[in-house]
Amino acid sequence: MSMVETIYMPSENDFRGKTKKFNGVQNGGKISNGCHKKTKQVDEETEKAWEKDFCETFEETPMLAAISTYIGYLILVAVGHVREFLKSIGIGVVKCVAEPKIPGFVPLYQTWESFYSWYVYRRIQDCFCRPVSGVPGAKMVVIDRESNDHRWSFQYTGGHSTVLNFGSYNYLGFSQNSGPCAEEVEQTIKNYGVSVCGSRQELGYLDLHKQMDRLVADYLGVEDAYTVPMGFATNSMNIPSLVGKGCLILSDELNHASLILGCRLSGAKIKTFKHNCMKDLEKNLREAIVDKQPRTHRPWKKILIVVEGVYSMEGSIVKLPEVLRLKKKYKAYLYLDEAHSIGAIGPHGKGVVDYFGLNPRDVDIMMGTFTKSFGAVGGYIGGSQALVNHLRLYSHSAIYSSSMAPGVAQQIVSSMNIMLGRDGTREGEKRIQQLKWNTRYFRRRLQEMGFILYGNKDSPVVPLLMFMPSKIAKFSRESLNRGMGVVVVGFPATPMTKCRARFCLSASHTKEMLDEALQITSDIGDLLAIKYSKAEPPSYSENDVPLVEDS
């Protein structure tokens, strides 16, 4: 029997009684998925109560903007092909690393990606990978640089600019080099050193790591938790330990690259469903149970639904109550990635489960990272004791990677204790409410100005749609010149007609900072003519959020 077949997932005994079923199919092969028998009549109004306060906006791309975007890309690609032709006949100047043409050998790295990088991305690459200095707090220091060869290369000028920081994941404002967290981290480094130089299974597991694991489990409200020193690897290295050949993964089409890689490495069959579309998810679940595995027509060993809490490019929040309803109805498992939701949303800052007031033990695998809200690095997986014990034994991240550095572990412990109020103050509650207030205020003002925004009213990720790549470049450069740092994103990270700027809000932003950023954004919006929205003004308000005053 393979390792994948014997892994420990949360059992039927934990959640659904003692009858052993695999995704709604019993041993005899008859479908028994709970569709036909219902012992309790559930009030539909109670089930849908969460929808009354659930507000998300996704305006369509204006036709003129879409046509202009396609024409712009067409011109860029055409010019690139002309330059490639000139290079091939010896006229054009070769400024990139060119692959030698060896007879009998296929090109090794000169692909469409290379072409796109040279002739499209290069033109605006000064807007990306900007070097910064210092901590990514409410403000940051950007190192100045210039290019004398049309952005093929850059040189530092020796200067720097201090700008408002709307480009870093610092939701709760813990990315700072002063205060109680920094002091405790400094003392921990003096006691433990800067690294453990070993994996969990090779003397790299300290009492500090044990304390951190227990604290994370307590924070999440689950039996146990397992921590990993890298957020990306938390998904990519642990999903293959949970599912494998003969299993089916139903993945949201906008899931993060780490989830996609982990699913591919697992060897399981992967099917995507439309973003946050419960009808499409249910359709896929039904087909999986009815059609079973291709060729053999055996029942799937497991069906795993993979979703995120807050989607970092769209700013949307998963409809978790509906996902849980479908998971229970069709006897599937749920993998919830809370990288951008843990700490950032919910009345207690405990993520999307807390946001909807659900039971965390209804989620089979809870994943998240410490990089966005807690000012650290790494990630965690929380769930049942059996699940966590299995990962500690079989996960590649437990065997082949060094354990988390003591200073990083202490940062997580210190910040989580503040969030739980165990430091004897209301600082954690204050940060949660401030972030929620900042989010609603910033989103409301931008929508009133006429910008097209994506996402949920409570998502601290605020995508502002500009559509054309030339406009995201101009927006980024103008923002930096006016004292604001913001991330811009274009194709292929987004669909071709949905280029955008992405604001990341923080509890450390003051109202004065938000107002300054709003004024800068409005001025640039008028300059670039990107106030495309025709939607009605938002009905929500930040006045519904009670702030915690300083004691």
Image (cartoon, helix red, strand yellow):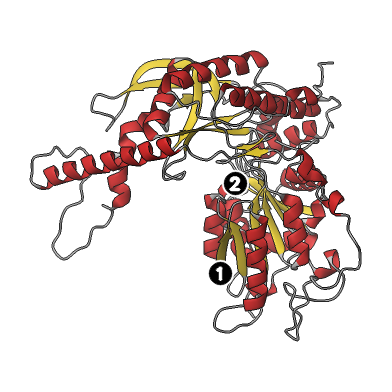
Residue 170 or 434: which is nearer the viewer? 434
Can residue 506 be seen? no
* Above or below for 379 versus 472: below
Residue 118, x across and y down, in percent = 28, 41
Label 2 Cα crowd, 10 Å radius (few <14 / some 14-19 / many 20+): many
Q: For this rendering, which residue is in front, 287 or 433? A: 287
Residue 61 position in % (x across, y down):
48, 39
Q: Which residue is mark 2?
A: 231
Q: Can residue 122 be seen at all in this image of the molecule?
A: yes
Residue 67 higher or lower than 546, as above or below: below
Which residue occupies the extreme bottom position in the image?
Answer: 28
**Observer-nearest residue: 479 or 197?**
479
The quadrant of the picture occupied by the C terminus is top right
Residue 311 picture quarter: top right
Residue at the image point whose x is 67% and y is 43% from the top: 317
Q: In the figure, 289 relative to 15: above or below?
A: below
Quarter of the figure with the N terminus: bottom right
- Mark 1 vs mark 2, CA separation in Å: 24 Å
Q: Is residue 421 left or right of residue 345?
A: right
Q: Nearer the viewer, mark 1 or mark 2?
A: 1
Q: Is residue 529 left or right of residue 331?
A: left
Q: Amino acid at mark 1?
A: Lys
Residue that protrudes farthest toward the right in the picture? 40
Percent of width and height locating residue 190? 66, 31
Identity of the residue drawn at 61% across and 62% down: 250
- Which dot marks residue 29? none
Q: Which residue is mark 1?
A: 269
